[in-house]
């Protein structure tokens, strides 16, 4: 008997569609031609800069005295105040700043009012002064300056650990009713498993861009054999073994297979003309675009996404490496924003950066060490852009905002305030906010005003 010929691309997609249809009766129940997303669709997209992004070289003050102090302390890491290495922007109060030239792709969006910065944001238990930090008269986040601990805390929104959930997952919990009857995953990581997306009710779902989730052994001949194997697998996945762990694994597998078929049906770049950069972050945001494109089929009105880019632990050789990392971030964010404009939902999707901590203002040779407060980017049609929110720290070693003597600045804006502002725009009610950010009660302003 001769071997069956290799499948054509069209045949493969047809069989992928067959597989998706066969699994369409699964737990998700998402292949519903009648499902429609509401006009008030909203999405939050987090870009986590792993390793501790150096916010001091993301945006720098250009006003004379502040810039002189910045340059004196930063030394060889300082960005010069000229248009060849910084991109000038002006806040609404008239203060002049410079964005790192790696952010060239998104720089024009500042003047268009779509791009903003939140200054000196970080993990806090409550508002903290230098004196309180030194004498430990207020609670402090556990294990400050530790990558692993601070990464968990920043994703969990919990200064004392994780509690098993992430703040985006709890946002998804609080807004489940806005998704109606849809059981499509409302919190999805496209950068591997992420605590950020885990809720008390909502389970975190993770996808790897471009990774084919189709089961092996289904590229066979004849068609009846394919159908029989699909039916057999479906029976295995739906069989009630009575074992909770087995059932949970089967549910995850069924969800993945169903979503895989839907994404394959899109093909290309999610039926948008926007071209995404080829790097890791660009491909993650391309995947997010594809999933958002499915909102009419899934019936989703609220979705949160987690993306990530590593390499920001710049203890040495920072200058070029950091510029290139920011270039990747900027190019990917610009493409994603353009895709939301193309889809007509730019004012319903807000993208923001986060990182476990910032860096020290004082360099360590050709790099910088672990810090605390950090500056973050915000981009989207609903962003009240062209401004800097929060308060820049006083750039003085051992000064009022320094936790020590190297410029590891105490945050002047808490993660709770930052995330609470995003959550409020997303649709989390004031009554539900304490379940999302229990620590927010310790801070005076619960809405930073950067979203319309």
Image (tube, helix red, strand yellow):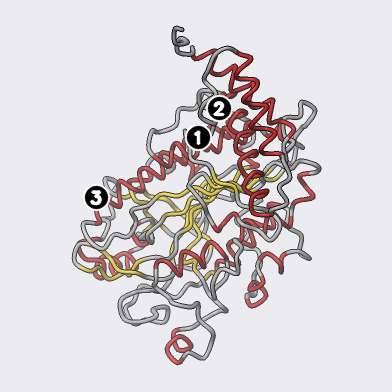
Q: Is residue 322 above or below residue 404?
A: above
Question: Residue drawn 59% across and 23% down?
Answer: 16
Q: Which of marks 2 and 1 is nearer the N terminus?
A: 2
Q: Name the residue under label 2.
A: 270
User: How far apart are the two marked residues, 2 and 1, measured between alpha carbons?
Assistant: 7 Å
**Cβ–Cβ under 8 Å for marks 2 and 1:** yes
**Cβ–Cβ under 8 Å for marks 1 and 3:** no
Q: Which of marks 1 and 3 is nearer the N terminus?
A: 1
User: How far apart are the two marked residues, 1 and 3, measured between alpha carbons?
Assistant: 26 Å
Q: In this view, does 384 lie to the left or right of 317?
A: right
**Image quadrant in which you'd find residue 27:** top right
Instruction: Tell which of 451 and 360 is nearer to you.
Output: 360
Mark 3 secondary-structure assignment: helix
Question: Residue drawn 70% across and 45% down?
Answer: 302
Q: Which of marks 3 and 2 is nearer the N terminus?
A: 2
Q: Mark 1 points at which residue?
A: 286
């Amino acid at each position: 008997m001769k071997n069956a010929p290799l499948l054509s691309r069209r045949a493969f997609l047809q069989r992928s569609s067959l597989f998706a249809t066969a699994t369409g009766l699964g737990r998700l129940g998402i292949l519903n031609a009648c499902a429609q997303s509401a006009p008030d669709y909203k999405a939050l997209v987090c870009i986590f800069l792993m390793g501790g992004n150096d916010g001091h070289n993301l945006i720098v003050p250009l006003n004379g005295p502040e810039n002189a102090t910045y340059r004196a302390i930063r030394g060889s890491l300082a960005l010069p105040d000229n248009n060849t290495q910084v991109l000038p922007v002006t806040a609404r109060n008239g203060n002049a700043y410079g964005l790192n030239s790696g952010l060239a792709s998104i720089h024009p969006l500042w003047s268009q009012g779509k791009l903003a910065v939140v200054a000196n944001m970080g993990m806090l238990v409550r508002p903290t002064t230098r004196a309180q930090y030194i004498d430990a008269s207020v609670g402090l986040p556990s294990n400050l300056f530790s990558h692993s601990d601070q990464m968990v805390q920043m994703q969990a929104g919990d200064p004392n650990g994780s509690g098993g959930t992430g703040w985006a997952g709890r946002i998804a919990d609080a807004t489940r009713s806005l998704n109606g009857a849809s059981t499509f995953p409302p919190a999805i990581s496209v950068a591997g498993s992420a605590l950020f997306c885990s809720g008390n009710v909502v389970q975190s779902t993770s996808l790897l861009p471009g990774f084919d989730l189709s089961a092996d052994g289904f590229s066979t001949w004849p068609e009846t054999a394919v159908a029989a194997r699909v039916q057999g697998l479906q029976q295995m996945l739906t069989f009630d073994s009575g074992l909770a762990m087995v059932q949970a694994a089967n549910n995850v597998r069924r969800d993945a297979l169903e979503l895989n078929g839907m994404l394959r049906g899109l093909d290309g770049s999610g039926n948008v003309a926007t071209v995404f950069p080829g790097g890791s972050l660009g491909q993650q945001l391309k995947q997010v675009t594809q999933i958002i494109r499915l909102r009419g089929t899934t019936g989703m009105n609220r979705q949160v996404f987690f993306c990530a880019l590593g390499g920001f632990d710049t203890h040495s050789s920072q200058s070029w490496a950091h510029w290139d990392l920011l270039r990747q971030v900027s190019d990917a964010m610009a493409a994603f924003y353009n895709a939301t404009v193309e889809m007509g939902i730019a004012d319903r999707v807000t993208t923001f950066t986060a990182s476990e901590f910032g860096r020290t203002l004082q360099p360590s040779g050709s790099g910088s060490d672990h810090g605390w407060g950090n500056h973050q980017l915000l981009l989207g049609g609903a962003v009240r852009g062209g401004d800097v929110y929060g308060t820049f720290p006083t750039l003085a070693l051992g000064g009022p905002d320094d936790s020590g003597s190297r410029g590891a600045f105490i945050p002047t804006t808490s993660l709770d305030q930052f995330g609470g502002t995003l959550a409020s725009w997303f649709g989390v009610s004031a009554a539900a906010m304490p379940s999302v950010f229990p620590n927010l009660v310790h801070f005076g302003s619960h809405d930073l005003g950067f979203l319309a």
